[in-house]
Image (tube, rainbow, N blue to C red):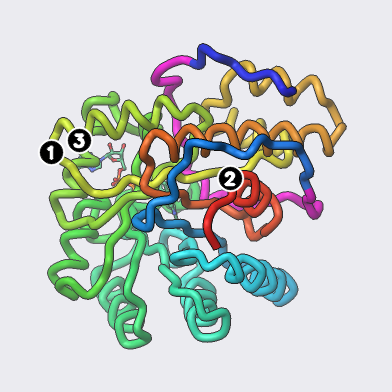
Amino acid sequence: MLAKNPRAPRVSCLHALSLTFFASKLAPTEEVGCTVGFRVPKGITMSQDRRYSFEFFPTKTDAGHEKLLATARQLASYNPDFFSCTYGAGGSTRDRTINTVLQLESEVKVPAAPHLSCVGDSKDDLRSLLTQYKQAGIKRIVALRGDLPSGMGMASGELRYANDLVSFIREETGDHFHIEVAAYPEMHPQARNFEEDLQNFVRKANAGADSAITQYFFNAESYFYFVERVKAMGVNIPIVPGIMPITNYSKLARFSDACGAEIPRWIRKQLEAYGDDVKSIQAFGEQVISDMCEQLLQGGAPGLHFYTLNQAEPSLAVWNNLKLPR
Ligand code: FAD
């Protein structure tokens, strides 16, 4: 049996990641095929209301795009509720995000949600994207502030925060889109403090968001604490945990250190101890994430959103361990 820490800290900490933005940097280079003996959870009731989704990032090369589509086809056989595709703030992936989303809908035949960020894009840019998506029959959108690549500054764009973007989408398109927003159980890295970050999350819900997807975390209690706090502030939209499979420690640790993401010490230490033993890292990672997802679902999480990094196997290993519906 793999060890797990019975006393993980409550709000484990500080900086959540802008992960999807950096997805390509984290993408594993090897195919992953984890085979750990996860005990089938007994207590999870699979509510019909729960939703499951997979996130991709648009690739730069044709080969990468073909791989993305192959992954999407594999994941489609599990009947997820939707796929989503990230957007490079400032429009750096505009065409690739549009093309990917449209192809996921028309060829892979799974509803697809484009991410859309306001920092660096003008209202006209955003309006034109919204019109294009609406005309293509897209019904869901992930509305974000975004992070501009370094050197591009912060203040370009006419809308400053995600709550401004949510209001803008509602003004422009009424109730056409189901709007998702980002949530940070371990606090957004630029927030002045946890309380203000909670209030800023509430602004997004009040502006008209229908549901939220969290930044990834490795401590279920931080998620439950966040949900409890925003519920007490009157927010009742579903908040779906964003799940990052652990497959490659060095990349994850490097990125997490740079961005201040909290990898609990007991997980970090165990992963470090495996050194270059990729199989053990993957098996341990699969167990840790499956355990956490079990906790989340048993505790009432309204679904799971997998950050696939364009790989099917790590997410499916967790899905199969949990015996999620398909
Ligand atoms: P906001 O909700 O606007 O918050 C940003 C910061 O400003 C926070 O510190 C908040 O406390 C503060 N704030 C918010 N509103 C106000 C206000 N009205 N007044 C004062 N302060 C305020 N990035 C990309 O570039 N492309 C993607 O496709 C992408 N997809 C993502 C998907 C998910 C599920 C998640 C969790 C993140 C994603 N990101 C993506 C990263 C995200 O863009 C960054 O984390 C970004 O720094 C914040 O975006 P936000 O929408 O959460 O911003």
The residue singled out by tag 2 in the image is: 322
Ranked by sequence position, the earlier of labels 2 and 3 is 3
The residue nearer to you, when weighing 213 against 80, is 80
Q: What element carries label 1?
A: loop
Tell me if 113 is positioned left or right of 290 in this view.
left
Residue at 49% over, 71% down: 97
Ranked by sequence position, the earlier of labels 2 and 1 is 1
Q: Where is residue 34 in the image (x, y as percent from the top left)?
A: 77, 45
Q: What element carries label 3?
A: helix
Q: Where is residue 285 in the image (x, y as percent from the top left)?
A: 68, 35
Q: Which label lies toward us, 2 or 3?
A: 2
Disc 1 CB within 8 Å of nearest ligand 1 atom = no
Query: Mark 1 near mark 3, Cβ–Cβ under 8 Å?
Result: yes
Residue type for callout 3: Lys
Q: What stretch is highlighted in magenta?
A: 9-33
Main SS type for the magenta part?
Answer: loop
The residue singled out by tag 1 in the image is: 234
Tell me the CA gap for discs 1 and 3.
Answer: 5 Å
Q: Tell me: residue 291, above or below residue 157.
A: above
Tell me if 91 is positioned left or right of 107 in this view.
left
